[in-house]
Amino acid sequence: MLSLLLTVLAAPSAPAITDLAVLDRAAEIFAGARLGEAGGPVAPIDRRLRLQSCPSSPEFAWRTPAHDAIVIRCPEAGGWRIFVAVRQAAANGTAAGPAASPVPRVAEPVIRRGDPVTLASEQPGFSVSAEAVAMADAAPGARVAVKVEGARTPVQAIAVAPGRAMLPPR
C-alpha cells in the first residue's frame, strides 16, 4: 500500500505542488497507525506548506530510534524535508496527550522572527553565550534556527524565554 501511494506521488502527471493529504496517509502507513493514535502522526501536515512535487518517491525514515517523528524528504525537489511528530503511547498503552483532539495546543511564542537572542550553552563549570537573531517564531522548548554573526549557517537552538535560547545537549 505504501509503495502505491509513493508511486502516485512520483507520477509524471502530478501537480507542481505535492498533495499533502497523500503525504499524511503515507506517513500513517509508514508509522503503522492512524492520525492521533498511539504510534501515528500527532497532527496532519500543515496545509500552508507548498512543497515542490517530488519527481521520485519521497523518502520516509524515523528521526531517532525512539520513533518520535517521521522525516519525509525529497532530495530532488529542492531538497525539501519535513518532520511529522508521532504520538507516543502512555504507560497504560493509550495515546499520550489530550484525547479530545489530535492537534496539539501550541504555546505562544517567546521568540519571534527577527528578535535579538542570547544564545547560550551551559555545562557544569562553564557557560558561554553569543548574540544571534531568530529566524522564526518559537514557543518555550521548541527548536528555532538562529543566525550568529560571522557564522555561515544558522544554528539550531531551543527557545527558553523571551530573547533567550540554549544550544541543545549533545
Image (cartoon, rainbow, N blue to C red):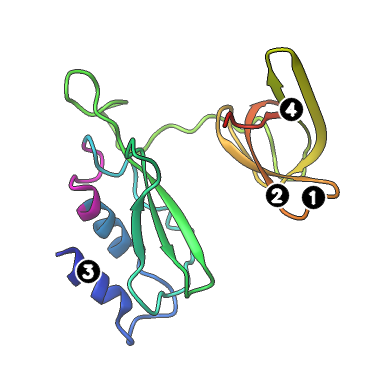
Q: Main secondary structure of the magenta part?
A: loop
Q: Amino acid at mark 1?
A: Ala
CB atoms of marks 3 and 2 within 8 Å: no
Can you identify the residue that label 2 sits on?
Answer: 154
Q: Amino acid at mark 4?
A: Ala
Residue at disc 2, secondary structure: loop
CB atoms of marks 4 and 3 within 8 Å: no
Q: Amino acid at mark 3?
A: Leu
Does 33 appear in magenta? yes
Vertical relation: 147 (above or below) 110: below
Q: Residue furthest front?
A: 125
Does 107 appear in magenta? no
Can you identify the residue that label 3 sits on?
Answer: 5
Q: Residue furthest bottom?
A: 13
Q: Which residues are magenta?
A: 29-37
Distance from disc 1 to disc 3, alpha carbons, whole Å, reads 40 Å
